[in-house]
Image (cartoon, rainbow, N blue to C red):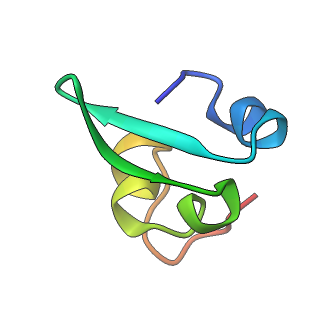
Amino acid sequence: MEQTAWLTFEATQTCPVMENGVVARSGPPARLRHDERVRKVYLGLRPGGPAR
């Protein structure tokens, strides 16, 4: 995911999340914000923490 994930979430309707060159997750930003793997690995947020 982009280093500027929150900006990307604001500017797109669908985001692909790449892992080792493969799309690991894809979907609307609202869903990805709450995906536990995306939050932990890509956004650096702990599970259950605030979703900006």
Q: Quadrant of residue 36?
A: bottom left
**Residue sitting at 71 percent across and 31 percent down?**
8
| Residue that protrudes farthest toward the left in the picture | 20
Q: Is residue 7 left or right of residue 28?
A: right
| Residue that protrudes farthest toward the right in the picture | 10
**Residue closest to the eye, 9 or 23:** 23
Question: Where residue 46 sits: x, y (%)?
Answer: 44, 63
Q: Quadrant of residue 32?
A: bottom right
Q: Is residue 31 above or below residue 16?
A: below
Q: Which image quarter is the C terminus in?
A: bottom right
Question: Where residue 51 sits: x, y (%)?
Answer: 68, 64
Q: Is residue 36 left or right of residue 23?
A: right
Question: Where residue 48 sits: x, y (%)?
Answer: 51, 78
Question: Where residue 30 sits: x, y (%)?
Answer: 69, 64
> For the image shown, how many numbered marks are present on the structure?
0
Q: Is residue 25 above or below residue 42?
A: below
Q: Is residue 6 left or right of residue 15?
A: right
**Residue sitting at 43 percent across and 71 percent down?**
47
**Residue closest to the eye, 48 or 16:** 16
Q: Is residue 3 left or right of residue 19?
A: right
Q: Quadrant of residue 33?
A: bottom right
| Residue that protrudes farthest toward the bottom in the picture | 48
